[in-house]
Amino acid sequence: MSSVYINPRPLLQVEKTGAQGLGNCYRATYVKITSLKKISESKIKEMYSLGLLHGGGQEFYIHSQCDGKEEATGHDEVFSIDSETGERAINKYSGEVNKALLYPYYEYNVEYRVDSGG
């Protein structure tokens, strides 16, 4: 029997969290990036320039710290799984369920604005 810790959270997730009209034909779209690893400002800008953040516009803003010093937004509690049964793994010496590990994740909020006029 062997066991493995598998975090069900994706390595990277991008989701649109909202949008609103700002007047004068401007519209803002808000996006949350969730990652198991810290993401630098340059990488977020690169994701935007590649169109990976649900669209684009004339203006782009990052509203979250992304300088490598940011704290984790939260932690996922991940249990080890028995590779044969798919059940939570049991320590063969103690007979108890293996303890969970905490895996950090980070969230980054961005906004882009588009002028729909013209």
Image: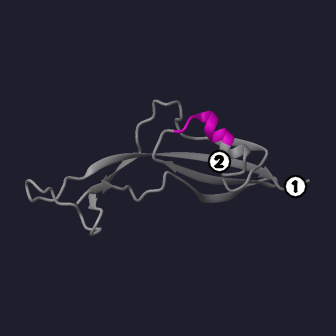
Quadrant of residue 40 in the image? top right
Q: Is residue 27 above or below residue 67?
A: below
Q: Quadrant of the N terminus?
A: bottom left
Q: Is residue 79 above or below residue 43?
A: below
Q: Position of residue 111 (x, y in %)?
A: 65, 47
Q: Secondary structure at mark 2?
A: strand
Judged by its main secondary structure, the magenta piece is: helix
Tally of numbered tags: 2
The mark lying in front, picked from 1 and 2, is 2
For the residues labelled 1 and 2, say whether their Cβ atoms are less than 8 Å apart: no
On screen, residue 56 versus residue 103, left or right, reads right
Point out the tag, 1 or 2, that comes first from the N-terminus: 2
Q: Position of residue 16 (x, y in %)?
A: 61, 58
Nearest to the observer: residue 16 or residue 10: 10
The stretch of residues the image draws in magenta is 39-46
Alpha carbon of mark 1 to alpha carbon of mark 2: how far?
19 Å
The residue pinned by badge 1 equals 117
Q: Secondary structure at mark 1?
A: loop
Mark 2 is on which residue type? Glu
On screen, residue 60 versus residue 101, left or right, reads right
On screen, residue 81 versus residue 98, left or right, reads right
Q: Is residue 110 visible?
A: yes
Nearest to the observer: residue 101 or residue 70: 101
Q: Please give the name of the residue rendered at 87% of the width and 55% of the height, measured from the top-left corner.
A: 117
Residue 41 within the segment the image draws in magenta:
yes
Nearest to the observer: residue 96 or residue 12: 96
The residue pinned by badge 2 equals 111
Q: Residue furthest right?
A: 118
